[in-house]
Image (cartoon, grey):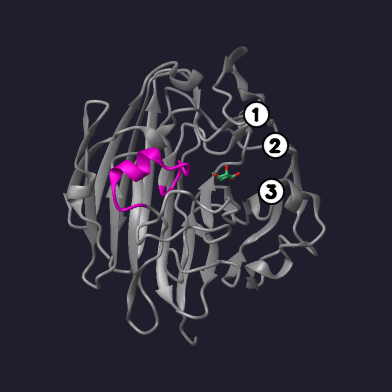
Amino acid sequence: MLISKENFNKQLDNKQVDLFTLKNSNGFTAQITNYGARIVSVLAKDSQGNFDDVVLGYNNIDDYVNSEQKYMGATVGRYANRIGGAQFSINNQTYKVASNKGYNHLHGGIVGFNAKVWDANQISETKVELFYLSVDGEEGYPGNLTTVITFEVSEENELKISYSATTDKATAINLTNHSYFNLLGEGKGSINDHIMQINADGITEVVAGSIPTGKTRPVANTAFDFNEPTVIGNRINDEDDQLKIGNGYDQNYVINGTGMRCAAIVTEPITGRTLEVITDEPGMQFYGGNFPDAKTLGKRGDVYKFRSAFCLETQHFPDSPNQPNFSSTILDPSETYKSTCIYKFGIITND
Ligand code: GAL
């Protein structure tokens, strides 16, 4: 079901909130709002040719602003995932960022990119471009950071997200998209019977608070090995300290290989829908939707329940600014940050 543009017609922070519809010639559709640079809906075909909305969310701007689920479909930044102790140093200068998860920093702080109204420009029927200037000191981060994101649908039923950013002072950056997927259709039950495949031989090991130790833990012979397609729910109650810390699946995978490559393929056997995640990022957080049953009702009036969605958030590793073993997430004024994530939708084929 398409969401009405009217439901997003509102002024927030002196800016106009809006809803943009991107559609290809097959009918594959994505709707994007500039409130948090969010994916509001994705209409994808099943193997019978029926379209359904496969991302959780709300059908109006007020629910996005007021929901206890702050990151539904949102762009997360400046730094997605955790920064341990809510501080880091660049060139011997320590920066304290907002601590919004115990003593730690999560998803950009108290008012992250998910809660900002971005400037927007719909370029064509298939492409929208969003801009946001995050000022020096916002949530404790150094530097004026200008971010540009494009969302584009292709004829191959891909939703491509391209990020770029520049700064006037060295800063930490790690952008991702926080869509909650359910290939049965949003609000249509648990994701535990979806089949997951993740091209990763390791996860970044964490301690309480999901803060990395700096080590990679091999997935072989654990509940985290999805190199072969495996039903998500099969091993979710295994005895494993990392599963306990995450309250289920909520780990950062070290994706095999480099460059643009397939990180994961999810298959839903009843509808036949598939989702492939392609990225140039080294990591991907697989979050199994371990949230309590939601209070704010979803787009079709459904209660979004525990484990009724999964997120596959392409990114650098958590807490990289404090982990010398991890690849750098510091952006220098002489550089341009770039990152790409493609969510490609399909149906099961027999070959
Ligand atoms: C995920 C994160 C989870 C949780 C969620 C938002 O990216 O890994 O631990 O914070 O976002 O509720």
Q: Nearer the viewer, residue 98 or 344?
A: 98
Nearest to the eye among marks 2 and 1: give it.
1
Q: Position of residue 129 (x, y in %)?
A: 26, 43
Does the beta carbon at disc 3 come under 8 Å from ligand 1? yes
Asked if the stretch drawn in magenta spans residue 62, the answer is yes
Q: Which residues are magenta?
A: 58-73
Q: What's the residue type where badge 1 is placed?
A: Gly
Which element carries disc 2, helix, strand or loop?
A: loop
| Mark 2 nearby-residue class (10 Å; few <14, some 14–19, many ≥20) | some
Q: Which mark is residue 209?
A: 2
Please state which of residues 319 and 272 is positioned toward the viewer in this rendering: 272
The residue that disc 1 covers is 102
Apparent side of residue 5 relative to residue 131 in the rendered image (left or right): left
The answer to which of marks 2 and 1 sits earlier in the sequence is: 1
Q: Residues within 10 Å of mark 3 (few under 14, many from 20)?
A: some
Say left or right for 190 vs 145. right
